[in-house]
Amino acid sequence: MDLKKYVEAGKIGKEAREYGIDLIKEGVSYYEVAEKVEKYIIDAGAFPAFPVNISVNNVAAHYTPVKNDGLAFKRGDVVKLDLGAHIDGYISDTAVTVEVGTNRWEDLIEASSSALKEALKALRPGIEVRELGRIIENEIKMRGYNPVYNLTGHGLARYDLHHGISIPNYDDGSRATLRPGMAFAIEPFATNGKGQVRNGKGGNIYMLLRFMNLSGFYEELYRRFRTLPFAARWCDFHEDYESLLSRGVKKGFLYHFPILQERRKYVVAQTEHTVVMLDDGPIITTE
Ligand code: CO
């Protein structure tokens, strides 16, 4: 494990997140925020570990804008800004929820952020993930909301955004433990809905599923993004990228992430940090 690179990626992720928060204002396009935050990460000496996710209101995760989607922030929107940086494949993953111009959902956002805070306080080498899940669920329920049961935090490895372990947002009975040498992201989602997200339409985020015998456009995708998720708008180095992406999905070697959403009338908040566990305790790289 390259601790130095994890720490540096975390620092850049944190700074990009703080920079992004200030950009989210009524009337500003999702596209502008995503592009500016990604440029910030690159200018700081890292690469985006995945496209900046901008998921609004009942959408919990996995939307990234395309240039002409016409989407802009509206007053009262509850915006999840989820981003990551990587250095040489060592990843940070961090998220925050911002409400645009109102504070109607302050308590919901607080339920997610304090769940994360309490989980981080309890972290120690060897802790069972179910204990973190219990803490997260309690903290959210105490405030009258539900965790999203079918979204989890996740292990991280080099060039691998979802590696090995899952960190549930409730006690799922798992005896898996967080041991020294592991890197992972903890991300409590809180909602006034039932706490079950479903797949929606495509969110413009793709990932290669096969890496052998690729040629042309697809080989270039591997060269640029390896095994990490990437945005459709990052592929405009090729004129026909939209049809080539669709073809890759049809042929089964590209994955197109669906957006993950609660039912329409509900709202979801998310907060996330990346942690590296060491023998003498955790380092929170994005804090
Ligand atoms: Co994550």
Image (spheres, rainbow, N blue to C red):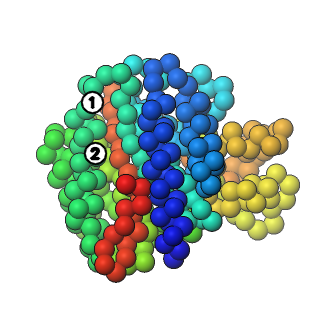
274 on left or right of 145: right
Mark 1 secondary-structure assignment: loop
Q: Position of residue 44 (x, y in %)?
A: 59, 51
Residue at (27, 30) in percent of width and height: 105
Dot 2 crowding, Cα within 10 Å, few <14, some 14–19, many 20+: many
Which amino acid is tagged 2?
A: Ser
Q: Considering depth in this image, is 99 or 266 the residue closer to the camera?
A: 99
Q: What is the number of the mark on residue 264?
A: none
Q: Tell me what residue is drawn at x 59 percent, y 30 percent.
A: 32
Mark 1 neighbour class, 10 Å CA radius: few under 14, some 14 to 19, many 20 or more: some
Q: Which numbered disc covers residue 105? A: 1
Name the spot of residue 270 as percent of width and height, x first. 35, 44
Q: Residue at the location (46% across, 44% down)? A: 17
132 vs 47, left or right, is left
**Farthest residue, direction left:** 142
Residue 54: percent from left, percent from top: 49, 37
- Give the residue displayed 51% in from the left and 53% down from the top: 12
As rendered, which of 80 and 165 lies closer to the eye? 80
Report which residue position mark 2 lands on: 112
Q: Is the distance from the Cβ of mark 1 to the nearest ligand 1 atom less than 8 Å? A: no
Q: Does residue 282 lie above or below 209 as drawn?
A: below
Q: Residue furthest bottom?
A: 279
Ranked by sequence position, the earlier of labels 2 and 1 is 1
- Residue type, mark 1 in image: Trp
The answer to which of 101 and 265 lies nearer the viewer is: 101
Asked whether residue 17 appears in the rendered view, the answer is yes
Q: CA distance from mark 2 to mark 1?
A: 11 Å
Check the picture and name the quadrant holding the C terminus: bottom left
Query: In the figure, 39 relative to 8: above or below?
Result: above
Residue 198 in view, yes or no: no
Residue 25 at x, y percent in the picture: 45, 24
Badge 2 marks a residue whose secondary structure is: helix
